Amino acid sequence: MIRASLAALLLSIPVQHTTSSSHDAAIRSTKERVRAHLSKVPGVIDAASKAFQTNCLTDCRDANKKIADKMQIQLDAISAAASEAVDAFLIRTVDLKSPAASSVQVENDLRAVLPEFGEPRVFIGATKAGPYLIAVFGFAISGGDSSITVRAYKWTTRGLALAGVSEKTMNGHAGIQTFRVPTDQPGETCLLLSGFKINANGPRNRMRLYSFDGNTLRTLWMPADAWGDFKITVSDHYFTVTGMYYRDDRLRHDTYVVGDGTITEVRPIK
């Protein structure tokens, strides 16, 4: 009974957020943890490369697929561990109830914590249930490969808590851009991510649209990849994708409206 009461008391105590000196220490320790995880990547790739060379003497195709699958599982685990280190940092240092809480400050902290790879983005929103935060960041893995994640956190009685993590389909893409697009749902944040891969056929663009309502992170839109270099423009009520399709040599001008949990293409708005 005493133990149960003590446990209940401990759970009811809000997380204490950091002072300036402890905040700096948290940045340093998290930076070290992230780099320690990512430092394992070369070893995983080197082991897979050696296994490829050995197995190709017998059964190249089937054996190499197994090796590649195993390597990917290991790389995903490394990225997940590095991301969880960032989760712990944000949960420890961000107080969304503080008037000083700002997306700019959290972005600056993430730049200090993460190895240089694109620009981390942070968005703060609120519903009747309370405030929340969404962070978009990534890691360079190897040979131009990447791990991209969207992570949503909601405010609880104990502080910030992880509420959702995106699927992995933006992994491997570079030049990631993140746009906050309008939605008609009160309190909801919708984020459009755009990135590309370049090969002999030119740039191949991939886009994903995510929404967070303070409780659930969802993928609203997973369009087919398109060959081309596209520009995204966001207005008060819609967003537009323009540019040249690389392989078809024709102009793209698509306009989309997000509302009621769905995305709809509408006639181009000049």
Image (cartoon, rainbow, N blue to C red):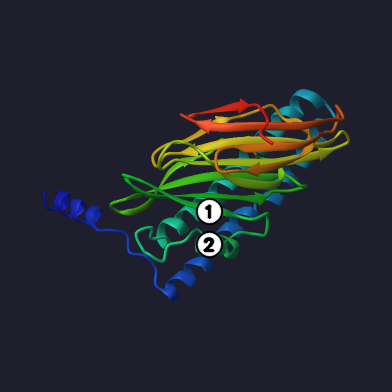
Q: Where is residue 181 drawn, in percent x and y?
A: 56, 42
Mark 2 to mark 1: distance in Å? 7 Å
**Residue sitting at the far bottom:** 21
Q: From this view, report whether residue 108 is shown above or below residue 139.
A: below
Label 2 vs 1, first from the N-terminus: 2
Where in the figure is residue 112, as x and y percent of width and height? 58, 65
* Residues at discs 2 and 1 in contact (Cβ within 8 Å): yes
Q: Nearer the viewer, residue 18 or 80?
A: 18
What SS does tag 1 mark?
A: strand
> For the point 51% across and 66% down, which residue is it?
27
Amino acid on which disc 2 is placed: Val
47 left or right, relative to 73: right
The C terminus, quarter of image: top right
Is any atom of residue 168 visible in this view? no
Q: Which residue lies furthest to the front in this view?
A: 270
Which disc is residue 104 wearing?
Answer: 2
Residue 34 seen in the current view: yes
Disc 2 residue crowd, few under 14, some 14–19, many 20+, Cα 10 Å: few
**What amino acid is labelled 1 in the image?**
Val
Seen from this angle, which residue lies furthest left?
Answer: 1
Q: At x 60% / y 62%, what residue is drawn?
A: 111
Q: Please give the name of the residue rendered at 74% of the width and 37% of the height, measured from the top-left corner.
A: 242
- Camera-nearest residue between 77 and 253: 253
Residue 91's quadrant in the figure?
A: bottom left
Q: Which mark is residue 43?
A: none
